[in-house]
Image (cartoon, coloured by chain):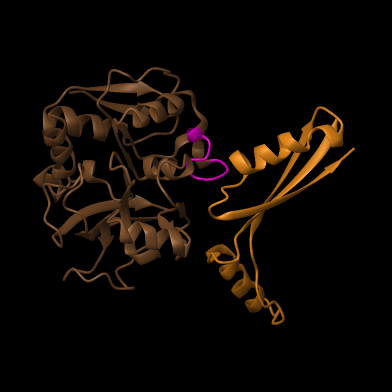
Chain colours: A brown, B orange
Amino acid sequence: MKFGVVIFPGSNCDQDSYYCIKDVIGRPVEYIWHQETDVSGFDCIILPGGFSYGDYLRTGAVARFSPVMQSVIEHVERGGRLIGICNGFQILCEAHLLPGALITNNRLKFICKYVNLRVENDTSDFTHLFKKGELLRIPVAHHSGCYYADSDTVKEIEDNGMVLFRYCDSSGRATPESNINGSANNIAGVINKKGNVAGMMPHPERAVEGLLGSTDGIRVFASLVERMM
Amino acid sequence: MSKVKVYVTLKPSLLDAQGKVIRVAAENLGYKDVASVRIGKFIEMEVNGKPENIKTQVEELCSKLLANVVIENYRYEIEE
């Protein structure tokens, strides 16, 4: 079982993701350059955070058309796992691999801090090692993390259990105050209907060592490993 | 050669946080009559071909790349 971490020009969480898989999870992982056109050797692909192509036009809008993305789409069609973190999530929405879009935070600020997340789905390939309702501490670092979808799409996402995580307060309540960026229904992460593509604005790969404040992110990757064995 | 002007705007249902801030700034400058501000993008392109022949291309380009139709509307003008 092999992980691949895509590097776009402007990616900056590729090394964190690589380190997380190799040294913390202890699984084989390789970098995939954005010009690559064959990703058939990978079981799970990570689109890391950063500012791919300088966030020109819209976040993720240009990366979506880079050569590697066509083969990533084929990987998904074959049933391969794919997770987009932060800028990776924005790219997945632009590529329509996930519903909705990420727009500028409603208070216009770049937010870089630990946030509280509530686990909403504890059966997916990405989250089955969590418990529904469990409270997590995972950092965010973004300027365009406000999740938007029209009301019909939000209803579909909710009705099908496609919300993975929600921003919440320290008691686990998804309040307007704890909704750091103005996301629809406090949504911080979603999964596609088929269950093999996930996206989230918080950075689980930055919450994998106690020394750095949290190890809550580990189980995202450990969940994947267990399902892919 | 045709000149193409593309206007991309956030859909009315979306909050335009930047526009809101600019409206307040205008008010602070004394322009009390500015009721709302929405910010969008203006894109100019030069495209080879006559205006009547490039419409399909421009339409595709707008819907695939220049605008994200989940959150944005677009319109364009094609000139000789």
Residue depicted at x 61% and y 72% = B25
Name the chief secondary structure element in magenta: loop
Where's residue B78, x and y in %? 83, 42
In depth, the one of A71 and B45 nearer the eye is: A71
Residue B53 position within the rendered picture, expressed as x and y whole percent measured from the top left: 82, 32
**A200 or A41: nearer the eye?**
A41
Q: Residue at x 60, y 61 (%)?
A: B11
Q: Which image quadrant for residue B59?
A: top right
Q: Is residue B51 above or below residue A2?
A: below
Which quadrant, please, contains the N terminus of chain A? top left
Residue A16 in the image: state x and y as whole percent: 25, 35
**Residue A120 horizontal/vertical position (percent):** 22, 59
| Looking at the image, residue A213 lies above or below residue A42 | below
Task: Name the residue at 28% across, 43% down.
Answer: A195
What span is colored magenta in the figure? A56-64
Q: Is residue A74 left or right of residue A140?
A: right
Depth order, front residue of A99/A29: A99
